[in-house]
């Protein structure tokens, strides 16, 4: 009897833990944020007030902003992150997505999403794509148009266009606010004390300042 109760308790606690590990379940069909609200936050949290559902229209559930690529940055990369700030219909649904484009030779620098697993579908092109697990093992290979790769939540991942034409990737996330930390910027563009970086990487003050200038935050 007692072991059964203990086992149930353990199971229940585990179930609670896994539930708390993702976005909260919605308590209504949808919640189009009321953009007139004075409570409008600067982030993409799910605590936005909803507009009256009788005022929702089909357009609230359609997003047309990823028909074309954004502008390439120096790294030959462009991304349009579609979260509830850009596409209010996603609010409270626990999902978001991204359109990423890579110019020939372009890269998506090593980065991670603290709050979401990502499924990356190659819509066009050929990319070297992979992630690193917490034992520093790399899982990487070349994937082509029509293939999908999964990047487990919180793990560092990266991509490079190795084809002869631009590549397009559609990524979807199991959080409406996956978060994004780029490793180079987090380390060299964040204002960590230089002395610590010198010791961490075994580099001179001059080498660290060169790295710093390269990785001022990407807007
Ligand atoms: C927001 O405010 C504008 C102007 O005050 C009004 O026309 C519109 O109906 C409001 N929208 C909502 C969703 O309350
Ligand atoms: C929502 O709109 C409907 C129809 O206009 C109205 O009957 C209802 O009272 C509204 N609900 C709220 C909470 O304002």
Image (cartoon, helix red, strand yellow):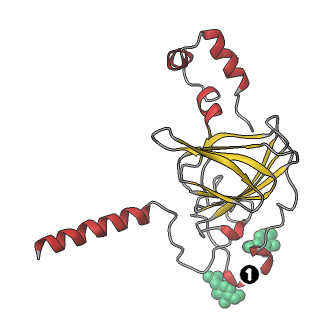
From the viewer's side, name the closer residue of 8 and 41: 8
**Up/down of 23 relative to 194, above or below:** below
Residue denoted by label 1: 55
Specify the quadrant that holds the N terminus: bottom left
Please indicate whether residue 90 sits to the left or right of residue 67 in the image. Answer: left
Q: Reply above or below: 69 against 164.
A: below
Q: Compared with residue 128, is residue 35 higher up or lower down, i.e. above or below?
A: below
The residue that appears at 24% across and 72% down in the rendered structure is 8
For the point 73% across and 24% down, which residue is it? 214
Residue 15: % across, % down? 36, 68
Q: Is mark 1 within 8 Å of ligand 1?
A: yes
Towards the viewer: 46 or 214 = 214
Residue occupying the far left of the picture: 1
Question: In which quadrant of the rendered view does residue 48 lie?
Answer: bottom right
Image quarter hosting the C terminus? top right
Answer yes or no: is residue 5 visible. yes
Identify which residue, 127 or 43, lies in the foreground.
127
Lateral position of residue 145 relative to residue 190, left or right: right
Q: Quadrant of ligand 1?
A: bottom right
Q: How many marks?
A: 1
Helix, strand or loop at mark 1: helix
Which residue corresponds to the image point at 79% horizontal and 42% vertical from the top-left?
162
- Position of residue 168 measured from the top left corner of the image (x, y, whole percent): 80, 54
Q: Is residue 34 visible?
A: no
């Amino acid at each position: 009897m007692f072991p059964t109760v203990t086992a149930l308790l353990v199971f229940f606690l585990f179930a609670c833990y896994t539930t708390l590990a993702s976005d909260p379940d919605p308590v209504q069909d949808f919640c189009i944020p009321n953009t007139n609200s004075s409570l409008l936050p600067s982030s993409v949290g799910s605590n936005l007030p909803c507009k009256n559902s009788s005022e929702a229209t089909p357009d609230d559930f359609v997003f047309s902003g990823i028909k074309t690529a954004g502008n390439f940055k120096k790294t030959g990369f462009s991304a349009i992150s579609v979260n509830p700030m850009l596409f209010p219909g996603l609010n409270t649904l626990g999902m978001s997505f991204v359109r990423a484009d890579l110019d020939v030779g372009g890269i998506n620098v090593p980065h991670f999403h603290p709050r979401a697993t990502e499924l990356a579908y190659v819509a066009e092109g050929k990319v070297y794509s992979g992630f690193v697990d917490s034992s520093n093992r790399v899982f990487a290979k070349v994937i082509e148009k029509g293939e999908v790769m999964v990047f487990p939540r919180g793990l560092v991942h990266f991509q490079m266009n190795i084809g002869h034409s631009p590549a397009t990737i559609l990524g979807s996330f199991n959080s409406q606010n996956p978060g994004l930390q780029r490793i180079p910027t987090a380390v060299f563009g964040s204002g960590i004390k230089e002395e610590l970086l010198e010791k961490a990487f075994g580099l001179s003050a001059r080498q660290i300042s060169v790295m710093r200038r390269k990785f001022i935050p990407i807007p």
